[in-house]
């Protein structure tokens, strides 16, 4: 009896992520969602720019790599051309909430029937730990060496809260992967975000609070604790929008 | 079945694109090309196509990148400032070898510039439409009929050679109306696209559209291979028109609206006994070097007639290998050379008799 195996949605290419990085977990959850909904063969994923840029090598479905921040526009093009396919983007915080803010907001406002997996670890990982749009007030990074001073660097962007004011999105939820229980919950949310698209319900975005032990300068365990103690209070978990919640509850 | 209709240049581009099998138009409004978007907005919903007004030119070109990744024919259009924004996307389209058609109905620049016709994006279109080593096929229509014909050709060449192609028009040809004949179906050749991302159906390895290549030896190799392809394009796809060149002693080189003005001036000059002809590049890249190189052995001098501060003239000098003087006859900023203006230049150059 098979108790545990790699999801079919993932290739055999070894992940390049740093030890303790939670991208691997989130990749797995996306792949499990493809497996469980039996959609891998008709899914086209869009990789973004950042640590997860090489996710095109890791997901077994067709993959398109997008310019920095443009993944939702690229996904829009793919979905409009292939309305019966499943299209998702996998983006980090710099990509989605800084350089790609316009693409994020407008794909949400249009209610594009796509799924966005948004990984928020409050830092630019790939370029070596610079301040992100989601870096916390006071957070020390390479480009906020004295801590993020909100007087000069402004405040973090709360993506779920921001998008929840739009009429376009169908489903917005923020989850984390800091514990087995949280991972289970994240899996439910990611699965739902894909199922929504399969059912033609529209724009779904799951924000996953993640860690960056390397650039935070912590051990993996310390990083998970830092996420719980600092990120969770600033970025409250939960459902920010669910257009079909009542309908689904009635079932 | 062909029909002859009176159309604006911009509308001819849009209708020709549809008849060439383009069902995806992604754009953003800007003068003087907005008629393309307006036409597509009207027509696409009626034929099961997609018209989408993006939030920016950047987004529009990336939507094109998305559609092109699925192997479907798609197009975006803009004018000069908007094309600058699309340049990032053009680099990615070229890097991923994605067939796509981009229309630039040029206006005066730099900066926000004006809304009157110009050809000052020549360098941008033919030399540097983004970062990195790449080329686009650049087609320069000089009539409303060519707006249609070259649009159709742009789709075919893009598919045939797996690369973006650009229609480099200008505000005059975009806005003016002329009779145009359109074939019912301009989509003649269908191309296989096994590289397209349409879902594996669990029956093949996954396709990846990507331009991130971290190993320099591999990236170098890919660049070399792409330039081998460009050599084929140069060999097979160079297009130009020669007008009264048989006995010409002065050769004008001009494209687009400037070439039409030049033709009027040539007719007038001929009446006055001056032997002048025209080489009109139809493809700006690949540039018709051979006929200009050949002309350099026969004519006394060249005149580059252009609506820019001397951009085309560089390619004329290179192609003629500086064997003969190349003079500049230009207006810029939205001003257009009049036939008399060009005629005066012809007479002036004729008086020099091949001297500088």
Image: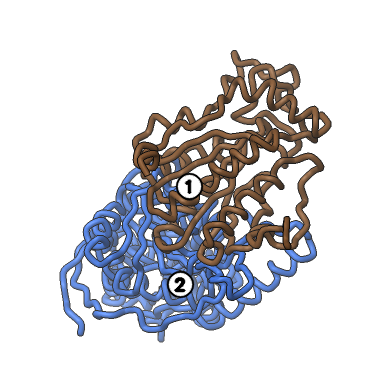
Chain of the residue displaying label 1: B
- Relative image position of residue B116 (x, y in whole percent): 31, 49
- Which of the colour schemes (rainbow, by chain, secondary structure, one colour) is used? by chain
How many neighbours does mark 2 have within 10 angstroms: few (below 14), some (14-19), or many (20 or more)?
Answer: many
Q: Which residue is mark 1?
A: B85
Q: Which residue is mark 2?
A: B283
Q: Is residue B93 above or below residue A213?
A: below
Image quarter hosting the N terminus of chain B: bottom left
Whether residue B323 is visible, yes or no, is no
Colour given to chain A in the rendered image: brown
**Count of residue discs:** 2
Chain of the residue displaying label 2: B
Q: Could you say which disc has been placed on residue A11 in the image?
A: none
Q: Secondary structure at mark 2?
A: strand
Q: Earlier in the sequence, mark 1 or mark 2?
A: 1
| Residue B129 falls in image quadrant | bottom right
Say left or right for B43 vs A143.
left
**Which residue sits at x=56%, y=24%?**
A236
**Which residue sits at x=60%, y=37%?**
A208
- Relative image position of residue A131 (x, y in whole percent): 67, 28
Whether residue B105 is visible, yes or no, is yes
Q: Which chain is blue?
A: B
- Relative image position of residue A116 (x, y in whole percent): 52, 45
């Amino acid at each position: 009896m098979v108790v545990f195996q790699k999801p079919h949605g993932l290739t055999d290419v070894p992940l390049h992520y740093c030890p303790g990085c939670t991208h691997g977990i989130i990749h797995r959850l996306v792949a499990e969602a493809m497996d469980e909904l039996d959609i891998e063969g008709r899914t086209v994923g869009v990789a973004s720019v950042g640590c997860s840029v090489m996710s095109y090598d890791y997901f077994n479905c067709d993959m398109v790599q997008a310019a920095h921040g443009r993944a939702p526009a690229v996904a829009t093009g793919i979905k409009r051309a292939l309305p019966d396919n499943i299209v998702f983007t996998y983006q980090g915080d710099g990509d989605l909430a800084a350089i790609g803010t316009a693409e994020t907001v407008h794909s949400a406002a249009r209610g594009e029937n796509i799924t966005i997996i948004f990984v928020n670890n409050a830092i630019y990982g790939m370029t070596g730990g610079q301040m992100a749009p989601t870096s916390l007030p006071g957070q020390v990074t390479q480009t906020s060496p004295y801590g993020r001073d909100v007087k000069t660097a402004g405040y973090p962007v709360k993506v779920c809260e921001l998008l929840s004011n739009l009429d376009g999105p169908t489903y917005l939820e923020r989850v984390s992967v800091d514990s087995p229980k949280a991972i289970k919950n994240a899996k439910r949310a990611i699965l739902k975000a894909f199922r929504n698209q399969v059912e033609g319900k529209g724009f779904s975005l799951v924000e996953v609070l993640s860690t960056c032990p390397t650039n935070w300068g912590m051990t993996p365990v310390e990083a998970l604790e830092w996420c719980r103690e600092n990120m969770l209070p600033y970025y409250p978990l939960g459902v920010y929008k669910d257009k079909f919640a009542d309908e689904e509850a009635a079932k | 079945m062909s029909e002859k209709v009176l159309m604006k240049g911009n509308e001819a581009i849009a209708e020709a694109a549809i008849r060439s099998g383009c069902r995806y138009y992604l754009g953003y409004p800007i003068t003087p090309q907005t008629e393309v978007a307006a036409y597509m907005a009207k027509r696409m919903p009626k034929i099961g196509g997609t018209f989408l007004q993006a939030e920016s030119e950047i987004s529009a070109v990336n939507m094109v990148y998305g559609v092109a990744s699925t192997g479907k024919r798609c197009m975006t259009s803009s004018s000069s400032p908007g094309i600058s924004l699309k340049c990032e996307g053009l680099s990615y389209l070229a890097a991923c070898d994605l067939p796509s058609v981009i229309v630039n109905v040029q206006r005066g620049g730099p900066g926000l510039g004006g809304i009157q016709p110009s050809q000052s994006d020549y360098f941008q279109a033919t030399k540097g439409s983004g970062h990195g080593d790449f080329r686009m096929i650049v087609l320069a229509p000089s009539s409303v009929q060519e707006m249609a014909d070259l649009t159709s050709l742009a789709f075919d060449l893009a598919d045939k050679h797996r690369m973006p192609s650009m229609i480099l028009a200008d505000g005059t040809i975009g806005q003016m109306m002329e009779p145009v004949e359109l074939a019912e179906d301009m989509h003649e050749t269908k191309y296989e696209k096994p590289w397209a991302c349409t879902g594996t159906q669990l029956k093949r390895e996954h396709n990846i559209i990507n331009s991130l290549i971290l190993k320099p030896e591999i990236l170098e190799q890919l660049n070399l291979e792409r330039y081998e392809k460009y050599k084929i394009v140069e060999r097979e796809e160079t297009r130009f028109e020669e007008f009264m060149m048989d006995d010409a002693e002065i050769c004008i080189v001009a494209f687009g609206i400037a070439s039409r003005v030049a033709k009027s001036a040539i007719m007038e000059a001929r009446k006055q006994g001056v032997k002048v002809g025209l080489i009109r590049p139809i493809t700006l890249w690949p540039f018709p070097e051979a006929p200009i190189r050949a002309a350099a052995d026969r004519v006394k001098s060249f005149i580059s007639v252009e609506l820019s501060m001397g951009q085309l003239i560089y390619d004329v000098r290179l192609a003629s290998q500086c064997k003969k003087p190349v003079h500049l006859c230009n207006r810029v900023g939205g001003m257009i050379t009049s036939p008399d203006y060009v005629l005066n230049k012809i007479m002036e150059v004729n008086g020099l008799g091949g001297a500088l």
